[in-house]
Amino acid sequence: MDALQVYPVSRANADQRAGRAGRTGPGTCYRLYTRRQYLDELLLTGVPEIQRTNLANTVLLLKSLGVQDLLAFHFMDPPPQDNILNSLYQLWILGALDHTGRLTPLGRQMAEFPLDPPQCQMLIVASQLGCTADILIIVSMLSVPSIFYRPKGREEDSDSAREKFQVPESDHLTYLNVYNQWKANGYSSSWCNDHFIHAKAMRKVREVRQQLEEF
């Protein structure tokens, strides 16, 4: 699974932030680390995103464009080979690639969706199992930031409202329950406010769902 990890900024990042102090008036930049840490522990520049993220989407796109030997592909900032190999393995596990590394019919279908490969596969398999409507909602809910909020001073009210939607089996079914109840209440913004749910996020979910349905 993907994880967000705390990591030191680079020297270039630190210098760029320091440049903000005094930009429009007198200012001072305070750094919460020592000069030794700045010189010894911070990288000179940040690591390009392509070298530190999951490449499954990129690999699937390149495969759909006919690129077969990804290890010899001329990336502007070449990612570690392990990242590419891990992404190829993940796509093989999902059935997007065959044992020779070529795109399968399932993989070609997956490449048409603007989603992460596991979610693409989930949608395609859902159509075979007859539960596309529910999976469309779940995938759409996963594509937006958290729909719940906890206003200061009303944390307990927010938590108790959230518990009413809880489905013990999984968070995914909880999201499905929230959407179905919102739909049953006429997609009401006031209903969202009463239940500590971001109405704007829910409208975005509905929009994403409609777009995916057209695929």
Image (tube, rainbow, N blue to C red):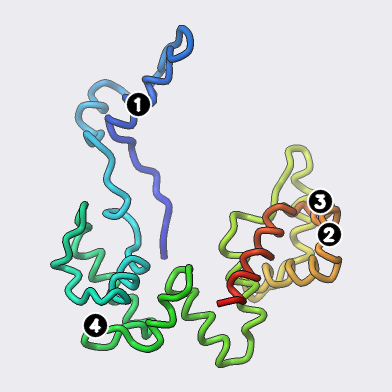
Toward the viewer: 202 or 172?
Answer: 202
Q: What element carries label 1?
A: helix
Foreground mark, 2 or 3, reads 2
Q: Mark 3 points at which residue?
A: 193
Are discs 3 and 4 less than 8 Å apart at CB? Answer: no
Q: What residue type is labelled 1?
A: Gln
Q: Which mark is residue 30?
A: none
Q: Residues within 10 Å of mark 2 (few under 14, many from 20)?
A: some
Q: Is mark 3 on a helix, strand or loop?
A: helix
Q: Distance between the residues labelled 4 and 1?
A: 43 Å
Which numbered disc flags the more N-terminal residue, 2 or 3? 2
Residue 122, given in percent of the width and then of the height, sits at 51, 80
Q: Mark 2 points at which residue?
A: 188
Residue 100: image quadrant is bottom left
Which numbered disc flags the more N-terminal residue, 4 or 1? 1
Q: Residue at x 41, y 65 (%)?
A: 1
Foreground mark, 1 or 3, reads 1
Single out the residue that lies furthest toward the top: 26
Q: Distance between the residues labelled 1 and 2?
A: 44 Å
Q: Mark 4 points at which residue?
A: 101
Q: Is mark 4 on a helix, strand or loop?
A: loop
Q: Which mark is residue 16?
A: 1
Q: Distance between the residues labelled 4 and 2?
A: 48 Å
Q: Distance between the residues labelled 1 and 3?
A: 39 Å
Which numbered disc flags the more N-terminal residue, 1 or 3? 1
Left or right of 211? Residue 30 is left
Single out the residue that lies furthest toward the left: 72
Residue 13's place in the image compared with 4, above or below, is above
Residue 7: image quadrant is top left
